[in-house]
Image (cartoon, coloured by chain):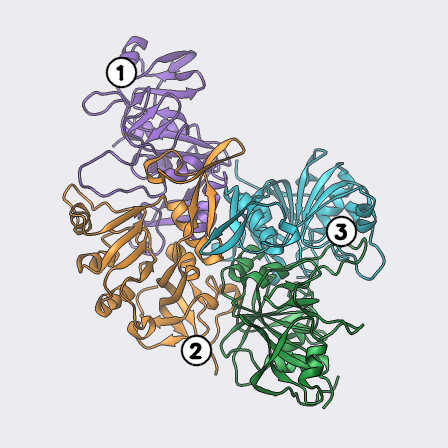
Chain colours: A orange, B cyan, C green, D purple
Amino acid sequence: MAIDKRVQSAADGIGPVKDGAVVMVSGFGGAGFANILQDSLLEIGPRDITLVANSATHPFSHTHKLVEAGLVAKVIVTAARGRGSDLSPFELLWRDGKIELECVPQGSFSERIRAGGAGIPAFFTPPGYGTDLCAGKEVREFNGRPHVLETAITGDLALIRGDRGDRYGNVSFRFTQMNFGHAMATACGHTVAEVREALDEAMPQEEVQLPGVYVNSVVAVGGEP
Amino acid sequence: MAIDKRVQSAADGIGPVKDGAVVMVSGFGGAGFANILQDSLLEIGPRDITLVANSATHPFSHTHKLVEAGLVAKVIVTAARGRGSDLSPFELLWRDGKIELECVPQGSFSERIRAGGAGIPAFFTPPGYGTDLCAGKEVREFNGRPHVLETAITGDLALIRGDRGDRYGNVSFRFTQMNFGHAMATACGHTVAEVREALDEAMPQEEVQLPGVYVNSVVAVGGEP
Amino acid sequence: MSVLSRNQMAWRAAQDLPDGGVVNLGLGMPVLVSNYMPADRDIFLQSENGILGVGPEAEDGYEDRNLVDAGSRRITLRPGASIVDSASSFAMIRGGHIDVTILGAFEVAVNGDLANWDSRVPDKGPLVGGAMDLAAGAKSTWTLMQYNTRDGAPRLLQTCSLPLTAPGCVKRVYTDIAVVEVRAEGFVATEIIPTISAEDLRARTGASITVADDCRPLAAPTIED
Amino acid sequence: MSVLSRNQMAWRAAQDLPDGGVVNLGLGMPVLVSNYMPADRDIFLQSENGILGVGPEAEDGYEDRNLVDAGSRRITLRPGASIVDSASSFAMIRGGHIDVTILGAFEVAVNGDLANWDSRVPDKGPLVGGAMDLAAGAKSTWTLMQYNTRDGAPRLLQTCSLPLTAPGCVKRVYTDIAVVEVRAEGFVATEIIPTISAEDLRARTGASITVADDCRPLAAPTIED
């Protein structure tokens, strides 16, 4: 059968999602949020999911909808602070002990996800040593400097946003849209890419930024370039 | 001063090289050998260098010239076998105890170099466990599977081959020319890229495969595309 | 029907490749498998120098010296192909994104241990390449080999006598006289050429081997060498 | 001359950026530094969402929603810029390829410890982002901050009271009243505004501080706010 990973809807691409699934969502700094896929996940409605995303509270990312709907048991993030002094929905749930939080330095966050996709279960790294975020982690000196042992993060489902995708699952990104999307796609059992445009023909090899081997479904959702 | 990393000759790009330097050289499968830079290194003539390259014996790579000239005290490679049953110059030196050899599985080789450039001193990985090549290395189980601890490789000088380079040190590669070049450029204190063509203007950002931050000098050497 | 030729062995292994799968073919005999992939299956060949989507060898006059596979063959790309650097290529391999790798082998043990990289030729240098990474990283590792050595000694053994490539990795063995699965209970022949009896097969095997209840005749079409 | 304004502090820090250097500017006040980089120096700004070569903010009507920096500003690219994914961006940061990072700070200790990510606001979620990675990974970490808190309490301390970002990382502190180096022997003021005496400075510092023999007046041109 000729490979064709293009699907008609976000729900078709995501398929069934089990309660307790680990779901990664791309996006950072306003670019690359997989919001149409997140809206679809909200409708699918799995419970007790672990959300792996840069922020639990970014106003532009629909991550906060998943949190507010009570679907999320735990977040693994680099940021979970709402803007202003009022508490965000996430912070209220967290204060009340209704959601678990693991806060990770952003470089260790991205490298742990890359490691998850690259078959590396753990690595030593300098950032975080001597801080509250890495308290209790194994420490070892290399070249006279202490390092902490960080472990890989893997997931069941990655929801990422790209610019163009083809039938083979190849994805390109526009400017800074890539951010965590590449690593997340490699680290999850099932990856869905929402893209502005799905191509009938194969993307030229020099335009491919995420090889199709890492992508299970491509959904064209339009939107401005 | 406006940045301009283009230089007139390979020797200008390489500069002085200390005896005992660790030198990485790109190239694999016939593509991406930095041969003009290796010829220049041969003339510069540092002694007791450690050579980090995929192969110590590939007939298309001028690596063997450095070995034959007696400049190399040690090689870190994935291959060191001459073709045919006769012994290659490397094998003769190795048999006679005149050159040291560290043979590394190719995936661990490339990841150790990437780790060297990425500030990660060590990582756990499955390949090599239970083999002679990893005898004596630390072993730890993750997810019920034994892994070996591999350490980063860094170098003093990287010699890589690309297709095009610009004044900012940005480099693009043609097809499979990239191989180890990207990781090596990140892992060395000084990186020189020989390229077919040096551009007067900046390379468009979407064509950059190796960001200029990793490249100190660009030498245009021509050659077929 | 007599024993299978090299091309027939390659044909037989090709028939089991999964539709839509990602497959890495080792140097030597395994690369012949690419000539016999079923036309109704869409398969992506990975090459460890960074190609996802290796196409046929380039025709005379259309070669590009920078478009080669890990075996230095000048190749083409199939539609949907992409190219990454070596570190990313082995992240793909180690991370479990290759469905099947077919490797040559000197010996396979009843527990799945593989020896395929070091035949202990005196004074010849080592050549490991990506063998250990592929054997440890692919979801399934198959071997393609003669059932016995030229001297008639068994290659399917209770314990490998040669240095290991990876422990416990081989799932299936394609040979000139039988297809053998490596199961928890040991070697199980699932196909045997009609001119070989179960008794003959046992005599040519260096470990206990059972014949599957549903064992079929091993057959392949006539192929011109 | 009175205390320096935020823009003047940014101007002062900008004057010390190295020609040809790679610099990461933290959110908040540090990003103002980009407005005052000396015209005769060619400096590459890195943003941890993957940009090497951040240009000026986009003019109205020319913004691209997918071209943003880590602070969500819609920006442009400078000539020679390139973009990578988050894992690669932090490989660049962690691997020591950033010459200088300028970060905001709550507190700096005499041993170079930095506290800049958690001011212990009750019930507000954490926001670490890339702060720990930048502080630990850049070759030089400078801070840009008011010398004292709004309440007049010292921020330069014997020991940080707030949670650490990274131990022993800060090399230099730019403030509204002084430039202070963090040396092996402790805090050393190298520039002080003329209206502040050494005695005043000591009174406003939470640790021992010496005045450099070659201490100069801290001054900046008038800048419209």
Q: On residue D204, which mark appears?
A: 1
The answer to whether residue C63 shows anywhere in this view is yes
Q: Which residue is mark 2?
A: A4
Q: Chain of mark 2?
A: A
Residue displayed at 29% across by 50% down:
A55
Extreme residue toward the right, this view: B86
Quarter residue A15 falls in: bottom left
Would you say B23 lies left or right of D55 here?
right
Q: Which residue is mark 3?
A: B62
Q: Is B59 above or below relative to D13?
A: below
Q: Chain of mark 1?
A: D
Q: x and y percent of residue B126 in the render?
A: 54, 55
Q: Is A219 above or below relative to C219?
A: above
Q: Residues within 10 Å of mark 3 (few under 14, many from 20)?
A: many
Residue displayed at 18% across by 41% down:
D123
Q: On residue D183, which mark appears?
A: none
Q: Residues within 10 Å of mark 2 (few under 14, many from 20)?
A: some
The CA distance from mark 3 to mark 2 is 44 Å
Q: Chain of mark 3?
A: B
The CA distance from mark 1 to mark 3 is 64 Å
Which amino acid, mark 3? Answer: His
